[in-house]
Image (spheres, rainbow, N blue to C red):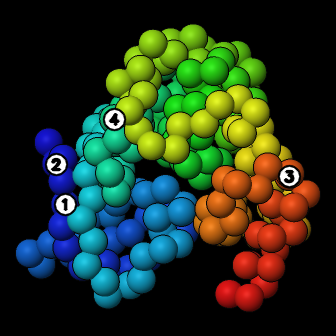
Amino acid sequence: MISYINGRVKFKGENFLVIENNGIGYQVFVPEELALKINSGGEIELFTYQHVREDALQLFGFKTIEELKLFEQLISVSGVGPKTALSVFAVAPIEDIISAIKSSNASILKKVSGIGTKIAERIVLELKNKVAAFSNMAGVKNADELDADADAVEALVALGFSAGQSREALKQVGATEKDVRERVRKALRILKSS
């Protein structure tokens, strides 16, 4: 079982990296936000989940052990495969996913391709008590903050920015600004200046 990898990024795809370690290149599927931040040629270390199927052997990589643990919990839910679970990280940061599950707010999960209402509600139901282990994480939000962030990201995506870029800009805006319109306006300034 490969649970950790450290090496140089030889190639960067849309949702995967090829990481060279001791002369061998490993294809590792990663969250979209991580793929955007990483440059080819740079060093990287990832916690990995090795998915074994009859016709494939795949690695899924995460920057933190918390992301890996949440990924493992997501794929434990019936109807959620590894690629779908990885897509959850493209919709919202880990803190928001945990907040949504804890507050029984399935709306964020429904935005993921491959997750409908039934599966989103099943995820919330099955994982609500299991995400209690993440309660000491910084950045876990209440339901109102979660909805405001989701609306702001959705507005920025509608304007042509990726979800990852939108979340990064909103982090720079900070949590002090509560009005969604103002958050979007300030995030737009940040995105246009970069």
Label 3 or label 2, whichever lies nearer to me, is 3
Contact between marks 4 and 3 (CB within 8 A): the answer is no
Q: Amino acid at mark 3?
A: Val
Q: Amino acid at mark 2?
A: Ile
Looking at marks 4 and 2 on the same chain, the residue that comes earlier in the sequence is marked by 2
Residue 104: percent from the left, percent from the top? 65, 18
For mark 4, what is the residue?
69
For mark 3, what is the residue?
180
Q: Tally the marks.
A: 4
The Cα atoms of the two marked residues, 4 and 1, are separated by 16 Å
Is 183 left or right of 104, judged from the image as shown? Answer: right
Q: Where is 35 relative to 81, above or below?
A: below
* Pick the front one: 44 or 193: 193
Label 4 or label 1, whichever lies nearer to me, is 4
Q: Amino acid at mark 1?
A: Ile
Is 170 left or right of 127, judged from the image as shown? Answer: right
Q: Where is 79 relative to 109, above or below?
A: above
Contact between marks 4 and 1 (CB within 8 A): the answer is no
The Cα atoms of the two marked residues, 1 and 2, are separated by 8 Å
For mark 2, what is the residue?
2
Q: Amino acid at mark 4?
A: Lys
Contact between marks 1 and 2 (CB within 8 A): the answer is yes
* Pick the front one: 189 or 115: 189
* Pick the front one: 55 or 70: 70
Looking at marks 4 and 1 on the same chain, the residue that comes earlier in the sequence is marked by 1
The Cα atoms of the two marked residues, 4 and 2, are separated by 15 Å
- Label 3, secondary structure: give it: helix
